[in-house]
Amino acid sequence: MTGRPANRSATIYDIARECGVAPSTVSRAFSRPGRVSQATGERIRAAAARLGYRTDPPARAVPAGRSATVALLVSDVTNPVYFDVIRGVEVTAAGAGLTTLLADTRESSRFERQALDWAVPAAEALVLGSPRLPDSAIRAVARQRPTVVLNRDVVDVPSIVTDNTRGMHRALEHLRDLGHDTVTYLAGPEASWADGMRWRAIREAGAALGVRVRRIGPGRPTVAGGVAAVAELRRAPTTAVVAYNDLLAIGLMRGLARVGVVVPGDLSVVGFDNIFGSDFCTPALTTVAAPLRSLGTRAVEHLVAQLGGAPARTGNAMVLPVRLVVRDSTAQRRRKRTSPAWGTTRVSGSSAQPSRSTSAGSR
């Protein structure tokens, strides 16, 4: 008998008295089971079950006087690419007994720095979504709090990225199979790690597939950024575009429609991410689908493990698979005929490809 009042929940001190061990030993048995002997661990867990002790790994790792929270910083909370990322973080964190704090850094390294100055003292762990700060600054933060970086590979910091290489190769392969031999890459923010990776990947894919690739930008990764890119694109007409993200692609299609350029009749367009709404636009957007919710889920799973005593996974970035979703914004390249609005190729008689989804490695 422990003498514990019936209306009070069991604590590690009750278990320690029951087993005749120190409270710190009980704590290690739950948070770092490898640090206690098997027999002691089994005795402690049996006593916990008898006393009705409820374990909460994240809460046990939180120092007294601090709340069990994970801070999520995203580069633009209005970008639908983060809808599923946020949901993945929030649901997984809640399941582990953690509260999620959300900060919007507005595509600004200055606001990101300010957000981190707030988040590091307030939260027990951090998820950085597409950060713009230098690697050295991110490593400094990771030394203070368990940290996971999304959509960027930072040396010595746990990182989770989508398979940009396979995604861009599959997008270019799809366009090549439709007869497009010159493709323009519509770039995103200059400070974006993912933009640099996607540009490098599409250049390498072009060399391998015999497709000429060129680039315009950088630009803001928004619908307005896509509309603004129309003027530059019209100065160097092409038959196909791969955009840094879906918002740029949707904005580009909107701007092209205003000047009488037909998608996919005059120009095929491919996006990246498969955000909510990418199939609502006209035409529905062909895009590389990224596992957005899994990004958030995997990040929190890793942080929960760290809070429970596991080492940080700081080797190569975890790479999540992508797939190509083919919709109505891409079609067979048409035979040459001058289009007054575009000054490039167009004939009647071809139709867009039916909507379908394929794996990143399939044809």
Image (cartoon, rainbow, N blue to C red):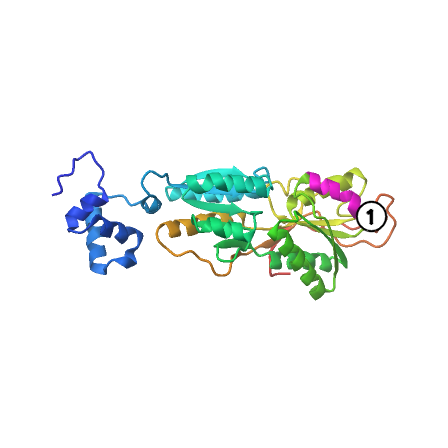
Is 169 rendered above or below residue 338? below
Is 167 rendered above or below residue 251? below
Taking the image as shown, residue 95 lies to the left or right of residue 330, namely left
Taking the image as shown, residue 269 lies to the left or right of residue 338, namely left
Q: Mark 1 = which residue?
A: 235
- Residue 232 in sight: yes
- Residue 298 in sight: no
Query: Residue 101: where, in percent of width, then height?
Result: 46, 38
Q: How many marks?
A: 1
What span is in magenta?
A: 224-235
Q: Nearer the viewer, residue 347 or 217?
A: 217
User: How busy is the neighbourhood of tag 1: few (under 14 within 10 Å), some, or many (20 plus)?
Assistant: few
Taking the image as shown, residue 140 lies to the left or right of residue 330, namely left
Residue 283: quarter of image: top right
- The residue under the point 68% across, 40% down is 223
Query: Residue 67: where, in percent of width, then height?
Result: 37, 38
Query: Residue 183: where, in percent of width, then height?
Result: 74, 55
Magenta segment's dominant SS is helix
- The residue under the point 44% across, 39% down is 100
Q: Does 347 lie within the magenta span?
A: no
| Kind of residue at badge 1 | Arg
Q: Quadrant of the N terminus?
A: top left
Q: Quadrant of the C terminus?
A: bottom right
Q: Does 233 lie within the magenta span?
A: yes
Numbered disc 1: secondary structure: helix
Q: Nearer the viewer, residue 329 or 120?
A: 120
Q: Nearer the viewer, residue 127 or 248?
A: 127
Query: Residue 225: where, in percent of width, then height?
Result: 70, 41
- The residue under the point 23% across, 38% down is 9
